[in-house]
Image (spheres, rainbow, N blue to C red):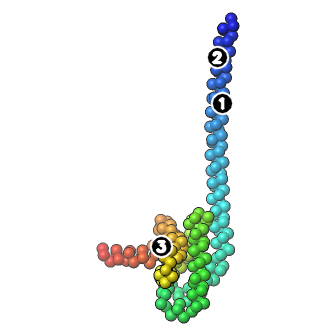
């Protein structure tokens, strides 16, 4: 009789162990689902804050950048800025304005390219304007890189402009929003065939 009680006790214990394992697995699955939802919520919140930060940061820079851009555009119109242009060479104040604009945009570009700010939000709000001014300043930037012996000078601003052009091309915006080298390649390709 003791053997039967011991056998029933062992079977009962094993059943409770199995039932405990099943319950533990079920709880782990529920915990994993909960953690996944929590992770998704955290990621969504981070993305929302990143977008908000992009808008707030660029909005704080915008009035000053707009003022600088207006001075540049009033002086050169839609033309590319050639480093040998008399309007540039003979105007140290304009040189400072252009350099200041480039430095600010380089720093903001680093923020976008490093993921601190959201490139899509920036592209939607000011991307075309900023990429167009990069195009306008690109001959001057290339000259600065050579004269300063600093090939990486304003490379983040350049990279941001290239990314904006890619986004705009992907979204089928106007194809004239390309870097000068891309336009030259396109013109040469069209001429050759």
x and y percentages locating residue 132 in the rendered image: 52, 77
Q: Which mark is residue 174?
A: 3
Look at the picture and state if 28 lies above or below 158.
Answer: above
Q: Residue at x 62, y 33 (%)?
A: 25
Report the mark closest to the observer, 1 or 2.
Answer: 2
Neighbourhood count class around disc 1 (C-alpha, 10 Å): few under 14, some 14–19, many 20 upward: few
Secondary structure at badge 2 equals helix
Secondary structure at badge 1 equals helix
Q: Which mark is first along the chain, 1 or 3?
A: 1
Q: Which mark is residue 23?
A: 1
Q: Residue at x 58, y 69 (%)?
A: 110
Distance in Å between CA atoms under marks 2 and 3: 76 Å
Quadrant housing residue 116: bottom right
x and y percentages locating residue 153 in the rendered image: 52, 76
x and y percentages locating residue 191 in the rendered image: 32, 77
Q: Which residue in the rendered view is the most extreme toward the left?
A: 193
Report the mark closest to the observer, 3 or 1.
Answer: 1
Contact between marks 3 and 1 (CB within 8 A): the answer is: no
Distance in Å between CA atoms under marks 3 and 1: 60 Å
Secondary structure at badge 3 equals loop
User: The N terminus is located in which quarter?
Assistant: top right
Q: Which mark is first along the chain, 3 or 2?
A: 2
Residue 147 visible to the viewer: yes
Residue 136 visible to the viewer: no
Q: Residue at x 53, y 90 (%)?
A: 88
User: The C terminus is located in which quarter?
Assistant: bottom left
Q: Which mark is first along the chain, 2 or 1?
A: 2
The residue identified by callout 2 is 11
Contact between marks 1 and 2 (CB within 8 A): the answer is: no
Q: How many marks?
A: 3
x and y percentages locating residue 94 in the rendered image: 58, 88
């Amino acid at each position: 009789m003791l053997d039967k009680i011991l056998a029933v006790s062992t079977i009962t214990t094993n059943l409770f162990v199995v039932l405990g394992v099943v319950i533990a697995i079920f709880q782990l699955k529920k915990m994993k689902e909960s953690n996944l939802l929590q992770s998704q919520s955290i990621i969504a919140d981070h993305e929302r804050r990143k977008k908000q930060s992009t808008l707030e940061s660029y909005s704080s820079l915008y009035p000053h950048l707009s003022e600088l851009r207006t001075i540049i555009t009033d002086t050169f119109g839609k033309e590319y800025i050639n480093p040998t242009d008399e309007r540039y060479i003979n105007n140290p104040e304009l040189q400072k304005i252009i350099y200041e604009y480039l430095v600010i945009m380089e720093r903001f570009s680093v923020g976008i390219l490093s993921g601190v700010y959201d490139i899509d939000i920036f592209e939607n709000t000011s991307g075309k304007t900023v990429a167009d001014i990069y195009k306008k300043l690109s001959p001057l930037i290339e000259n600065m890189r050579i004269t300063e012996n600093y090939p990486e000078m304003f490379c983040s601003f350049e990279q941001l402009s290239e990314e904006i052009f890619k986004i705009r091309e992907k979204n089928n915006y106007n194809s004239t929003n390309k870097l000068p080298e891309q336009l030259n390649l396109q013109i040469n390709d069209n001429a050759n065939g």
